[in-house]
Image (tube, rainbow, N blue to C red):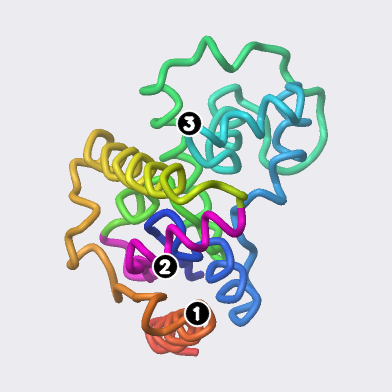
Amino acid sequence: MAVVTISRQYGAGGRRVAAMVADALGFRIADSELIDESAKRLGVDPELARALDERAPAVIEELGLALAAGTPLVGGGPAPQFDPQVLSDQALAEATGRVIESLGEAGGYVVLGRGAQGALHGRPDAAHFSLAGDLADRVKRIMESQGLQEKDAREACERVDAERAGYLRRYYGKDIREPHLYDAILNTSRLGVEGAAEVAVRIARRRFGS
């Protein structure tokens, strides 16, 4: 089976591109629509799960917590009761990596963020993409989507980009800007969100022989 990972600068349209790629390939997307389900399996309030998105994208993180707690990713059984705040960042990252690896083994997923390009680095059945965009375009997109002032949107882009780079460096020893990590780096300021998704799908199909 095959898996796609998408890294992205904040405001570069990552969620939209990931959704389009998943739809075109017939894959599932590891993204926010799974937060409520993962929270249910963990026995935590969905609001708490969503709040964790500030620290790290919630779907993969919460699925990682489920794996660390021994909860099946699919199927029934009672959800464990615990406070996810007691887990260290290291434990969270290690659990996240294991979940991403399990998604890679299962195949048929588009994994958005959380160092997936590091966790699945070297897999011949993985296609890795990085989304970039001009800062002015990303700031404008964040202003429109979140109702922020320009200064706040610009600061958010810089902060989140630094956090994502730091995560990949700390837990996988990789530079998020390293071009050799990716099959392609796609500039949504030049290609547009739809154009970037089309290119990613074309490359992925060539890589996967479909």
Callout 1: SS: helix
Name the element at disc 3. Answer: loop
Task: Characterize the local packing of mark 2: few (<14), some (14-19) or many (20 or more) Cα atoms within 10 angstroms.
Answer: some
The mark that comes first in sequence, 1 or 2, is 2
Q: Position of residue 123 (x, y in %)?
A: 32, 63
Quarter of image, res 139: bottom left
Residue 35 locus on image (x, y percent): 69, 41
Front-most of 92 and 107? 92
Q: Confirm whether the magenta stretch covers residue 137.
A: yes
What whole-number distance in Å separates the C-alpha atoms at marks 3 and 1?
26 Å
* Residue at the disc numbered 2: 137
* Residue corresponding to mark 1: 197
Q: Residue at x 60, y 72 (%)?
A: 22
Please state if 46 lies on the left or on the right of 13 as rendered: right
Q: Nearer the viewer, residue 56 or 182?
A: 56
Q: Which residues are magenta?
A: 122-145
Q: What x and y, as percent, mark residue 95? A: 46, 31
**Mark 3 neighbour class, 10 Å CA radius: few under 14, some 14 to 19, many 20 or more:** few
Label 1 CA crowd tier, 10 Å (few <14, some 14–19, many 20+)? many
Q: Image point 66% across, 34% down: which residue?
A: 50
Q: Where in the figure is residue 58, as x and y percent of width and height? A: 58, 38
Do the CB atoms of the residues marked 1 and 2 lie less than 8 Å apart?
no
Q: Is residue 122 above or below residue 67?
A: below
Please identify the quarter of the rendering in which residue 73 is found: top right
Residue 128 in view (yes/no): no
Circle 3: residue type = Arg
Amino acid type of the residue tagged 2 in the rendering: Asp
| Residue assigned mark 3 | 55
Q: Is residue 21 above or below residue 8?
A: below
